[in-house]
Image (cartoon, grey):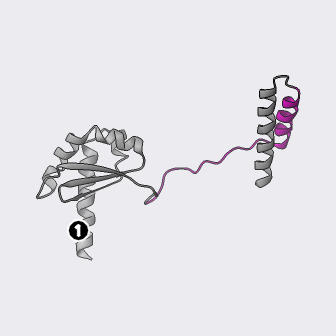
Amino acid sequence: MAYYAGQIEQQKRILGQVQNALPTVLAKQARHCLIKGKTLLIYTDSAIWATQLRFYKQAILTSVAKLSREPAEIIQIKIMTEPTGPSMQVTRTAKIPSATTIAIIRNDGLGVSDNQLKQALLNLSSTLERLSDAR
């Protein structure tokens, strides 16, 4: 158990060093870090943040150099596909309009002379109706 506790502490120290080398907004996006051989692995949530983290490669390598016997020479940024730990993200749900609003969209669609717009409004109203029934 002590070995694993030591590994976790080392990963926390590495993460802290990486986050200190980054701007505040970007530091929040580095979720986990570990050194494996001469490679520093940084885990983040999306490809967008991974791209931004790559711009700070040299600053990150310099900041973690003193934490291991062999300094890391390569950075690999990995994207986590499943959330880990407590998530601060709110699950978004679609706001389906009322039945009255859906009927207005359908009636307005029937009165439009442009066939493309008419079809789009009718499709929208039928989709909204189907979604409201699914609730």
In the image, the segment drawn in magenta is: 85-111
User: Could you tell me residue 135's position as x and y percent?
Assistant: 76, 54
Residue at x 80% of width, y 33% of height:
119
Residue 116, quarter of picture: top right
- Amino acid found under the numbered disc labelled 1: Gly
In the picture as drawn, the residue positioned furthest to the front comes out as 115
Residue at x 38% of width, y 42% of height:
49
Residue 80, quarter of picture: bottom left
Residue 95, quarter of picture: top right
Does 65 sit left or right of 33 as displayed? left
According to the picture, the residue beneath numbered tag 1 turns out to be 6
User: Could you tell me residue 83's position as x and y percent?
Assistant: 46, 57
In this rendering, the count of numbered labels is 1
Figure quadrant of the N terminus:
bottom left
Residue at x 26% of width, y 39% of height:
56
Secondary element type, mark 1: helix
- Closer to us: 10 or 107: 107
